[in-house]
Image: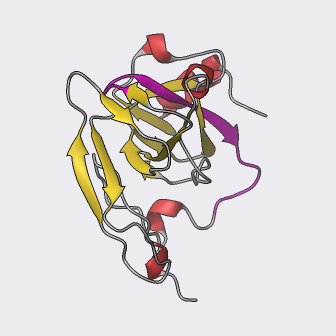
Amino acid sequence: MILSDKRILEEIEKGTIVIQPFDRSFLGTNSYDVHLGKHLATYRDKELDAKKHNEIDHFDIPEEGFVLQPGVLYLGVTEEYTETHAHVPFLEGKSSTGRLGIDIHATAGKGDVGFCNTWTLEISCVHPVRVYAGMPIGQLIYFPVDGEIINKYNTKQNAKYNDRTIRPVESMMWKNKF
C-alpha cells in the first residue's frame, strides 16, 4: 500500500515524514517530486575496488547546465533533505527523466525507516543529455510499515550514511566486513 497525497500531508503534519524544503505544488497523487541539487561527483579512478575507499571529485552544475556522458557514473544529490520515521521511502525516477534516457539510481531506490538525509543519486544516461540544478529528477513514494521497528537507520551503530550532507556521498562498501 502506498501513501496517498492526503496521507503524506497528514504524516508531515505529525512529523513522521519531513521534507525540507517542502512545496505543496510538488506533491503528486501519491508521491512527492524531488529535485537535482547543484552538486555532482565522479569517481577519480576508472577501476573501482569494493574493498577500498574509492574517492570522488565534487563539482557544481553551472547555470547553463551540465552535459552528462554515457559510460560515466555520476553521483548527484537531491535538493531536498528528508526524514522518514514510520514509513519506508522509495525514490524512483520521474517518467520525464527516464524519457530523456537518465537513470537516477543503479540499485539504491529504497530508504530505511529512520533515514534522515538528502538522497545520493547514482546517475547514468543512454546518450549525452544536459541537466540543470533544480530540475525535477525523481519522486518519493512512501509505504507503511507493518509491525514495530526495533532498529531505525538513524540509530544503527553501523549505518554508513548518517552524516547530514548537501553533497553526494561515495560508496562506503569498503566499511563492510567481507
39, 130: nearer the viewer: 130
Task: Please say if 103 is above or below 130.
Answer: below
Specify the segment rendered in magenta: 131-149
* Residue in the image at 68% along x and 29% along y: 3
How is the protein colored in the picture?
secondary structure
Along the viewing direction, whichever of 166 and 4 lies nearer the viewer: 166
- What residue is at 38 percent from the left and 44 percent from the top? 76
Asked if the stretch drawn in magenta spans residue 31, the answer is no
x, y percent for residue 108: 58, 53
Vertical side of 151 occupied by 177: above or below: below
Name which quarter of the figure residue 43 lies in: bottom left
Q: What residue do we see at 48% from left, 16% from top?
A: 26
Give percent across and percent down for residue 154: 45, 61
The image quadrant where one finds the N terminus is: top right
> Can residue 11 be seen in the rendering of this structure?
yes
Q: Is residue 140 above or below residue 41?
A: above
Query: Which sits in the foreground, 101 or 164?
Result: 101
Q: Quadrant of the C terminus?
A: bottom right
- Which residue is at 24% across, 52% downward? 58
136 magenta-colored = yes
Q: How many marks?
A: 0
- Position of 130 with respect to 88 (left or right) is left
- The picture places residue 21, in percent across and down from the top left corner, at 33, 27
Residue 27, x across and y down, in percent: 53, 17
Residue furthest top in the image: 25
Q: Above or below — where is 11 with respect to 123? A: above
- Is residue 79 visible from the viewing direction of this image? no
